[in-house]
Amino acid sequence: MMRYSVVDHNRAAIGVFDSGVGGLTVVRALQKQLPLEKIIYFGDTARVPYGVKSPETITGYAGQITRFLLGKNVKMLIVACNTMSAVAYDSIALISPVPVLDVISAGADAAARITRTKRVGVIGTPATIQSDAYPRAIRGRDPEISVFSKACPLLVPLVEEGWLDHPATRLIVREYLAPVLVNSIDTLVLGCTHYPLLEPVLRQEAGPEVMLVDSATSVAEKTALLLQEKGLQTPLSEPAAASFYVTDAPLRFQKTAETFLGRPLDHLEIVKW
């Protein structure tokens, strides 16, 4: 059990984890919303992508990462991977003594609030889509909403490869979106934290009449509210540094992260399991 004073607790970092680089969208949103908060980010770059793995494997990986971050005495956890949120949230919450937020709940809140026609599309990894987590969460907020889902297994590898505006990426996005857009949706949930990196392509292919829901922004807003509610805001008065841990390819991760975050990384370390 973690033991520290209230002051130390408030100074502790927010732990954020993802299967690779996708959770950087959450880090960026957190740094914009809560620039004074410390962040510890864990990207499991050796085992990405998670979306095509079994629920048992994903749950095992999630537990391993959760314990690693709890060992850093974080004051809360954010599951920045939609696949882990869909498959392993309950097991993560069970072992965590600190609050746990996830991107699916945040994305579902935003989608239910934004849609006007009550016709919502969701794109995600096969594991996320097969879990039916988004439709359940969205209809739990408004049972009249119709949800149309599509698994997009190629998008995470394309993002990890850095093909954010490649002709092949545009073609694949168009193919994936076609069966969703035919349902006259007015809201599209980006059900994977990698997908906001493809937002320009997704926005162009979806068209101006479709609102995109980026769960990273939504979870950052929920984080700010939770910190206030629990009295966990940092007492620091200067913008805090972020620490990054990966399980493979640190130089590749660093290049992607610095490009995306627009700043050099203060601390990057490789974890070997």
Image (spheres, grey):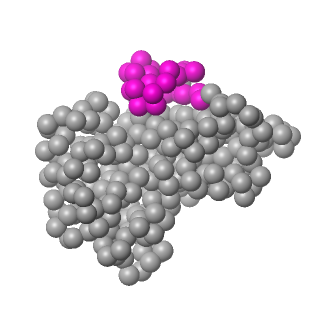
Counting from the top left corner in percent of width and height, residue 13 is at 67, 37
Residue occupying image coordinates x 58% and y 56%: 222
The foreground one among 84 and 146 is 146
The foreground one among 255 and 89 is 255
Name the quadrant of the N terminus: top right
Residue 54 in view here:
no
Q: Is residue 25 left or right of residue 184?
A: right
Q: Is residue 121 above or below residue 252?
A: below
Residue occupying image coordinates x 20% and y 64%: 181
Q: Is residue 184 left or right of residue 23?
A: left
Q: Residue furthest right?
A: 5
Counting from the top left corner in percent of width and height, residue 44 is at 46, 33
Q: Residue furthest bottom?
A: 144
Q: Write the start and end of the magenta stretch as one range.
A: 242-269
Residue occupying image coordinates x 60% and y 33%: 40
Residue occupying image coordinates x 22% and y 36%: 165
Task: Place residue 156 in its image quadrant.
Answer: top left
Label total for image: 0
Q: Is residue 25 left or right of residue 5?
A: left
**230 magenta-colored:** no
**249 magenta-colored:** yes
